[in-house]
Image (tube, rainbow, N blue to C red):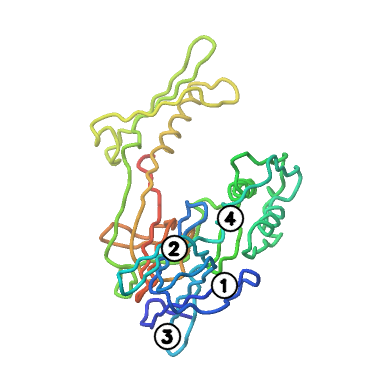
Amino acid sequence: MIDWHSTMEQTFEFYVVDPASWKDKFALNTITSCTINRDLSADTLGSATINSAEVIDENYVRVYLVVVQNGVKTRIPLGTFLVQTPSIKHDGKVSSVSMDAYTPLVELKGSSPPIGYSLLKDQAIMDVASRLCEENLRAPVVSINSENINSENKLLFNFTSNLNDTWMSFLKDLVSMAKYRIGLDEMGRIIFEPVMDKRSLQPVWTYNDDNSSILRPNFTDERDLYDVPNVVEVVYSTGSGYRTSRIVNDDPNSPVSTVNRGWEKLYRETNPNFSGVPSQRDLDAYAKQLLRNRSNLEHTITYIHGYCPVRIGDCVLLNNKRMGLINVKAKVISQSIQCETGCQVEETAVYTTNLWG
């Protein structure tokens, strides 16, 4: 097992992938650099930019990080990408080719279901999703163990595609009903991952700022306080008039309170859903909980570290005293991996703090 905090030798290897067997076909020796971008918010979950001395025809290319540590050689796949869109430059002596490359999910994004395509209710959602993936792209699909599928794995109604649907959007909406999302592993295989609440995620890696840290000193913390209210009003119309509730955050320990801001940032909600006509007590309780919920502040943390086996969607534990981060659980949402000596990863993660209540 690799100790990612210790000294090692790092190189990179690139292989053309046989789309029929999904195995490495032959090595590419003309690639000069590569950047891999992973993005949880992107339809295809990422892309790559590959620079080469020669044009690579439209092929799948697999990227490996090769580590030698204590005399043991290990190859770690970093991603599998379909190479397209070459841009060729020539300075009179040497040609260089920059190519955009995409994950296998681009095949689902590039084609669409037949017009009016429909799935009948009572079908097993994840079984259907696996079959449709297998039929509409070349990458292998990793099946889900039926014991791990939750009780919501059945269509409760006929599910019909929209005119502007791609297979990607159709399948994304389909599996979301079973509380899953479409993912990829580094070999380019399609996987299905359960959607979990951020609070229930457990860290797979801890980033410390001690002497053995793989973290670089660069850290940014972005947060938008403007949209966090310090006053909530709830208005409920009745047959004879209306009831209102007003809750104010005037806590001197809250950075967004009326005391610390010196002004009111109002959020108003009208006619929330109640079973029956709410009492004043019901309305006050609802308004208080609403202000508590709206007082959540999302932090977007960006930092740089040496490569380690963390993937987008993973939960990590952050410790950085200079940034005031002590055992902060954050969810990784994007990574940019530089395939060069040091294999630096620029990583972005998010976490939430509550500013009132």
Viewer-side residue, 272 vs 219:
219
**The disc labelled 4 sits on which kind of residue?**
Ile
**The disc labelled 2 sits on which kind of residue?**
Pro
Tell me the residue that label 4 is attached to: 182
**The disc labelled 3 sits on which kind of residue?**
Gln
Looking at the image, is mark 1 or mark 4 nearer the viewer?
Answer: 1
Tell me the residue that label 2 is attached to: 86
Tell me the residue that label 1 is attached to: 17
**The disc labelled 1 sits on which kind of residue?**
Val
Please tell me which of labels 3 and 1 falls first in the chain. Answer: 1
Identify which residue is drawn at 29% across, 29% down. Answer: 264
Rounded to the nearest angstrom, the CA distance separating label 3 from label 1 is 27 Å
Please tell me which of labels 1 and 4 falls first in the chain. Answer: 1
Question: How far from the left and from the top, in percent, is residue 12?
Answer: 43, 77
| In the depicted structure, whether residue 74 falls above or below residue 150 | below
Looking at the image, is mark 2 or mark 1 nearer the viewer?
Answer: 2
Question: How far from the left and from the top, in percent, is residue 331?
Answer: 44, 56
SS for callout 3: strand
Quarter of the picture holding the C terminus: top left
Quarter location, residue 284: top left
Identify which residue is drawn at 40% across, 74% down. Answer: 53
SS for callout 4: strand
Please tell me which of labels 2 and 3 falls first in the chain. Answer: 3
Please tell me which of labels 2 and 1 falls first in the chain. Answer: 1
Please tell me which of labels 2 and 4 falls first in the chain. Answer: 2
Question: How far from the left and from the top, in percent, is residue 16?
Answer: 54, 73
